[in-house]
Amino acid sequence: MDDNRPPPSPTPSRRSPGRGTAAVLAALAIGGATALTVTTLATGPNATPAAAATALVPVGSGSYDDALPAGATGPSDLNGAPVDPKVTGDFQGPAPTNEWWSSLIFQRYPDNPYGENLYAHPATYRPHAEGLEMGHPREPRLVADGLKYEFPHTADLSLGAVGLDSPDTRVADSGDWTVTARWSGGPTLDVTIGQGLPFAHARTDGGDAEVAFTGSPDVWHEDGSTVGATVNGNHYALFSPTGSPWSRSGNTFTAPTGDGGHYSVALLPSPDALDDFAPYAHSAVTGSVVEYDYDEAAATLTSTYRVETEALEGGTEGTVLAMYPHHWDNSDDEVAGLSYASPRGEMRVALGGSFTTELTAQGILPSLPTVDSADHDRLRLLIDEVLDEDAHFPSPGDTYWDGKAMGRLAQLVPIADSIGYTEARDELLGLLKGRVEDWLTAGGDRGLHYEADWGTLLGYPDSFGATTELNDHDFHYGYLVSAAATIARYDRGWAAEDAWGGMVRMVIDDVAATEDGLFPRLRSFSPYAGHGWASGHAGFAAGNNQESSSEGMHFASSTALFGALTGDDELRDLGVFLHTTQASTVTRYWQDHGGETFPDAFDHDVVGMVWGDGGDYRIWWDGGDEEHYGINYLPITAGSLYLGHDPAHAGAMYDSLVDRLGREPDIWRDIHWAHRALSDGDAALDMFEAQWQTYEPEAGGSKAHTYQWISTLAEVGTVDTSVTADTAHYAVFSDGDGRAYTAFNPGGSPITVTFSDGTELEVAPGALASTVGEGGGGDPGDPDPGDGDLGDGVLYPSGSALSTEPPGSEGAITVPDAGGVNRDGTPPADAVVLELEGVSGSFDGGGTSFSLPVDSGNSVANAVQVRVEYDFDGDGTVDRTETYPYFATNDVTGWESYTQGSGPSSVSGGFADLDGGTVRLRIWSALGTADSAVRTGADGGATLTVPFGD
């Protein structure tokens, strides 16, 4: 087996990113769900031949199937042959994948039944027929013309048993970051290793302990059952039971452990550390678990990392743990002077078998508010451009690209809501519901299959090895969960457990289950590493890898929001744990924040991928520099604010990219503008304004969302992490002169959010409240008739809606030109639409009137036209329509008054009382080739007066 095996080409062109059990039947874990056996026939461009009989398992309104679709492929080796989990007969529970050690359980290469290099940090390992190599790379090397730094595995010694010659290595047990591997060939050897664990604990049966050094060791301590030796500059201690001393023959040490025996090998920071390690020599690690506690009121996440141990000799339990920088930087448990080099920087030692970290939970919002200074009319037009597209989803679509399309639409929903564009909001929600429900229903062109042997949900059609290699599940499914959370924000019934929420929770559990059941614990999140691993099999000489850390964060924020919106605090807390923990690692390990991660000789400011053995500037496809940076930014959502927790660092990352390019970004420029806004919103807005009509958005983005994001940050400033709040869903910004406060209320009752600086913010149910701008939302139920009061009947147009209150400042509504076409009497798709919903009032016998100050500058032959519509009971049907003659503007700059004076040119329907109804004003250009403007504001601005009173 070649230790330098290069990564195979990704499938098909992107990146390499599951746990499971054959012992659990899918139908039994879903609250007594009954399996319905049907024969499915796939149709459409994605169809395979007639499917075999499939058991569709209902889950609320949705379902999954428990047999592969006809012609589909499940987990496979490199040659395409099916693979089963490589576990022992006594292995319990689902079979984990996407771990640092997954090559032990997923045999990707037919000629290697043992596994690839294993980067546990600080120690490294490689299994083979005679046991387990162990090493500790202390110095990095640069490869691939300096594009990658690595600490490659080099064997110092091998743990084994006398006479061992095993045909394979299998997984006997695992914890949150530890694994026990078994060799059976003559004698039996079990070895438990783990991230942050300097000890390798071995148990023997049928053969004596054997440790073979790869070179002649310098033995500096020898005392019967304890040997201290140095090889290749690394220091080790060998511990055997009392009465079973080590004996040496050449470079090999053996000890008479025999049946039921045990021994351990420890990697020491220095020979002087022997006394610190010796008490734990016979305290065998049997498991590992992270326990977290989220204190919402205090905005703190406390996490305890604990190993389970068994005292095989003496009474001492516990062990030694090496803490990563994101641990010791947030903990008081380290031991001064005991540390190791690693690909993530200095690892510091904690004694006793556990340590605790405390992180500030900065808040997770579903969206940003839309500020008044943004051009709301432009936002409408940009949203309409998306809605008017011929196809909103790819064909045939798959778990990733469909996901990005759903994510794109989901980001537009709260924007439309925040500007009062409820028609677009509801149309977008309808598109999302249709596609999400399609994925959550088995038996059609797309759906989810439960693979019992591996204990995982596989989505078909798939991409990037999500089914064959169990790659990227958090990346793909994060988009589906995000879409579901957006729907839940406006339709709680849809997300109920007995509706579509049950299937959404299955998707979440596939990625990050916390309880025993169909899925393994935290499949796509490695709690000790503080981030996920993308590859299901980790079949690389460099270990496992994680490319798009930002898509892992997207899953985390979406999970927190879905949990909050469905009233599941445990699910919300899981999302907060995943998001807050990863936020402490992403900029540190992918962007060298703090300057202590990357080697000095590594001449790059970011890595596209973190590997077990180091970091690589490259990504899984032949992309440009913009993609090397941007792959760890996208998708941009309100859950991306963590990228701006240190605005100076965010700015340095943007400057770094510009320096490398020698110009501003061109590819994925919208992603980089959005990232730029986290450090300099004004600069980002200037770039957007200069190019917004000509650039092509990244596949998961839209012009409307990019504009709203940038314009909001340009007004509120950068993220201010010095202020927290007593809710999981908040953000604070500062522009240097003052702060802006935003909070979201996912519940059904009003709340008062209190910020740590004493500021209070009242937030209605389902609403996003802000001291700057409009967040949208509110009670997602139907308007209550009588809630809206029309007052004196005077309504004030603004950039996004009609209001009974005048705008706070003067502004203007842009009315798009007619394109040289006569549109008299026919409102086009780009008409400005302003409305007021949920209002009640008695008809007073009068008529409609309006006063619109309009101007077309020095352009000639332009005309603006108005239509007023009434939906008296709010049922969505227009009951009365009044269309007025167009108003021709002159070619002199200055406001002219357009009124109802000449009466309507056409009327349909009569008047009636308003009972929770809607008043709508449409404004468009009937003639001309230039945009026009309508003035708004309290003094001299546009008004619409309707004939209704209290």
Image (cartoon, grey):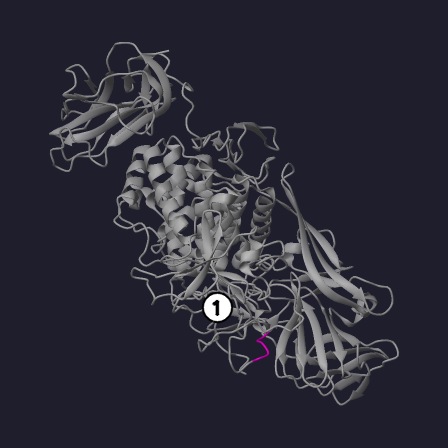
Q: Which residue is mark 1?
A: 469
Against 752, residue 339 (above or below) is below
Which amino acid is tagged 1?
A: Glu
- Residue at 29 percent of width and 59 percent of height: 44
Front in this rendered view, residue 515 or 303: 515
Q: Name the residue at the bottom extreme.
A: 250
Q: Is residue 902 left or right of residue 938?
A: left
Which segment did they paint magenta? 113-117
Front in this rendered view, residue 639 or 692: 639
Whether residue 300 is visible here, answered yes or no, is: yes
Query: Residue 276, image x and y in percent?
Result: 81, 65
Q: Is residue 679 left or right of residue 41?
A: right
Magenta span: chief secondary structure: loop
- Residue at 14 percent of width and 32 percent of height: 823
Against 492, residue 105 (above or below) is below
Tell me the quarter of the image containing the N terminus: bottom right
Whether residue 238 is visible here, answered yes or no, is: no
- Residue at 41 percent of width and 46 percent of height: 674
Against 795, residue 11 (above or below) is below
Query: Residue 742, image x and y in percent?
Result: 50, 34
Query: Residue 365, image x and y in percent?
Result: 50, 40
